[in-house]
Image: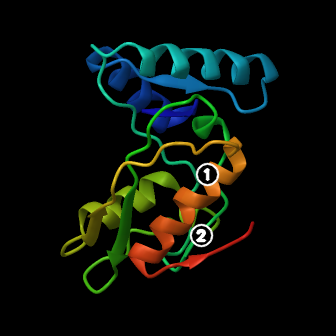
Amino acid sequence: MVGQIHGGLMGVIQRSMVKACPHIWFERSEVKDRHLVAKRLSDHVQDKSKLPILIFPEGTCINNTSVMMFKKGSFDIGATVYPVAIKYDPRFGDAFWNSSKFGMVNYLLRMMSSWAIVCSVWYLPPMSREDGEDAVQFANRVKAAIARKGGLVDLLW
């Protein structure tokens, strides 16, 4: 996985995950981290002996109605992308975390005590950057395909 470094309980979880399998964590406010992450991602995808990378390119999760603008960094490394559209069904338990309303522990307790977390998952065909396409255009094309398949609104922001 690739993601931002967290403190607290999430930081403990992140540090334990790294012991089981290599992950790429970064500090979003550090400019040098951005370059280091791009290099590590590029090196990782070039090494065919390594596992695929799981990336959530929105950088956040919204309320299961839309797909927000993707961060371009993961689309700038020249790798084939295997998009997955995920749409949660909130009938038995809502997977959306409104961080301004619930803290992480409260959210985790709500998730673990819900009747079920149900979602539809669609694996889309692999996508590669086309000739003349920059990282932003590639990210937007992948985002549009995911939104279309999941029946979600493709937001421009």
Percent x, y for residue 15? 42, 21
In the displayed structure, 74 sits above or below 108; it is above
Identity of the residue drawn at 71% across and 49% down = 136
| Count of numbered marks | 2
Question: Where does the C terminus fall, quadrant-wise?
Answer: bottom right
Mark whose residue sits in front, 1 or 2: 1
Identity of the residue drawn at 39% across and 74% down = 149
| In the image: residue 97, left or right of residue 140 | left
Q: Secondary structure at mark 1?
A: helix
The residue tagged 2 is 101
Q: Amino acid at mark 2?
A: Lys
The residue tagged 1 is 139
Q: Nearer the viewer, residue 103 or 155?
A: 155
Identity of the residue drawn at 25% across and 82% down = 92
The answer to whether residue 72 is visible is yes
Query: Could you tell me how far apart the alpha carbons at marks 1 and 2 are, in whole angstroms?
Result: 30 Å
| In the image: residue 61, left or right of residue 105 | right
Q: Are marks 1 and 2 in contact (CB under 8 Å)?
A: no
Query: Alpha-carbon neighbours of circle 2 within 10 Å: few (<14), some, or many (≥20)?
Result: few
Asked which quadrant contains residue 116, the reply is bottom left
Asked which quadrant contains residue 115, the reply is bottom left
In the displayed structure, 9 sits above or below 145; it is above
Percent x, y for residue 100? 65, 65
Most distant residue in the left direction? 115
